Image (tube, rainbow, N blue to C red):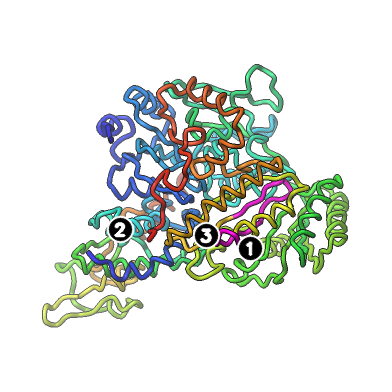
Amino acid sequence: MNTVDTKQLVDIVGKENVRENAADRYVYGSDSSVHEASAWIVVRPTDYEQIQTIVHYANKEKIPLVARGSGSGMSGQAVPSQGGIVLDMKRLNKILDINLADGYCRVQAGVVDDDLNKALKPYGVMYPVAPASSRVATIGGEIANNASGVRSVKYGAVRDSVLGMTVIMATGELVHLGCRTRVEAAGYQLDRLMVGSEGTLGIIVEATLRFVPIPKFRCLGKADFNQLEDAGRAIADIMASGAQPSLLELMDNVAITAVNKAMDMGLSDVDAILMFEADGMVKEAVEFEIQKIKEICEKNGGSNIQMSYDAAERTKLFAGRKKLFPALSKYMEHYSCTSLADDMAVPYSKMAEAARKIHEIADKNGVIMTAYGHCGSGCMHTKILMEATKGKQWYGAQKAVAEIYDYVISVGGTTSAEHGIGISKAPAFKKEKKDSLPYMLAIKRALDPNNILNPGKLMDAPDDWVTATKLRYNIN
Amino acid sequence: MEFTRLKKWQDTLNLCIRCGYCFEQCHIFKITGWETDTPRGKLIMLYGLMQGDLEPSEYLAEKVFECYMCKRCDSSCSAKVPVTDIFTEAKADFLEAGLDVTGTTSFTDEDLCSRCCICISACRHEARSYDPKTDKIVIDKVKCQSCGCCVAACPSGAAKSREGFGLSQRELLEQVSTYLEGGLS
């Protein structure tokens, strides 16, 4: 039941920063997942003090509070499944400091990834996380989901770039976590605890991030494979060889077909394509890496290999992969691309087997799935393509999701590599983390005793994701 | 309210994966910062209308009529959702349902209008016509793309469109002046 006192919130942030029209509440109840719900009210704070006051009020009145960046999450993390106040963090968008000498920058949570990199570029450095959604994803959202991207194989995920942060706890207290130095061994790494906490432990308002030099040379390559398994073996061999790719991406035939249809890319109609990149400050070193990767591709049946150092050619070569997610909607008429079972990670040696298994399970359950992703870091993206308005398809999707995760867990993989758990991955996550779940719950209860911070997510999400919220599609 | 035109787009609306990549393309969002003003936000609202989750309202109609139809979202959408075509159909549905709002479409100040009809020839969308019976300039709000050509062409300042999104000539000049002053100081 909506118990929000609008006047109090208007007093805190001003009338112009509060929306409670049904249309606004509906829009802010949606993200890039299959879930949707309605917020009770949407509030846009402009400073930390306002957030402290809002959190204090919500905690006192036991009102759910969902922090939201751009709502580009794929698992329902930003969906206010229990109603409450949605905190739109996008106005906290200041880059506070770029400290080249000490190797860090300080940014507010609502800064968009690409905007940060635009600001860093003149200094010759970059924040390397680079999720595909970097044009819209906010730093706060990336931290809360422990996001990563195409270059995670070399530069890691958000957790590898965060040095510290400022967080507003469930009590309304503002605390500084972590540090501004490259290393720290001063007690519990509470900043790490916040990474991937999906807004359930505190509201991240500011982050101290490290950056890396922008490499002078980048060489991007592409190899066609007639067998998906060959591409999978190539991935495992590359990673075992000691080579250090800065990008290693797989696209299966479903993905290839989709980008060819959506973007007229003219990619070869093969079983799989591997895209690989090496970068560095010395061309000879980059060339050494790229040749090594190329040779491994060839040894595993890779053909039609193209490679380029030229920025324009690299952009063209990578365009299909960059916009693959939305392009998947064009794979087949009447089929929608749903963010389900979308980002598991498996050991390198299981990459080929996992890709094949995904297709087998999809066939068995009457849906179409694709296998692609940042395979150099073990991340296997899939999406379920289906006639989303047909109820029967959701039954198949639910079975497929469960079977895939059972397989992933059985081979030592994980439920989520970079998109987080939210609602839709919670059942599998609970299975995977069975033994550590009570400890996660204990942390949540200790830090948020009134359960106001993004309730109903992660450990607290329902066991049936299909009925956990209203689904965004008009299902017959 | 039937929304017969809008309902034809249901399959197409299902293609939208709600990635939000259209945010960066939208001028209105850049000014207001509200997700409700983004192409994605508007598509979500229209889907809610079709599903019966949202009631038709002037507020909701206004959001759709506010689109400047620059079509940057159309061209940037990899899922190829024809965003502004959907908005155009929705506008027709809203008007049919009696939700006659203006948004950013142009209008005419009758007191200033000399009926010179320059605005009609300036409109490349054939949204303006002259009605001799009423002696008024008639605007087809579905056809109007809020391009502002009529506003710029009107010698009497009678053709107008809503300001406040930082995009009118006056607002742009103000922004440029502020930037230059800041830069020079």
Mark in front: 2 vs 3: 3
Within-10-Å neighbours for mark 1: few <14, some 14–19, many 20+: many
Label 3: element kind? strand
Label 2: element kind? helix
Give the CA separation, mark 2 to mark 1: 32 Å
Residue wearing tag 3: A337
Residue wearing tag 2: B49
Residue wearing tag 1: A255
Q: Which residues are magenta?
A: A363-382
Which residue sits at x=65%, y=59%? A360
Residue A248 vs residue B148, the one in the foreground: A248
Kindly check if marks 2 and 1 are in contact, taking CB atoms under 8 A apart as contact. Answer: no
Q: Which label's residue is closer to the chain start, 3 or 1?
A: 1
* Same chain assignment for discs 3 and 1: yes
Q: Amino acid at mark 1?
A: Ala
A11 left or right of A424? Answer: left
A356 left or right of B138? Answer: right
Label 1: element kind? helix
Residue A194 vs residue A334, the one in the foreground: A334
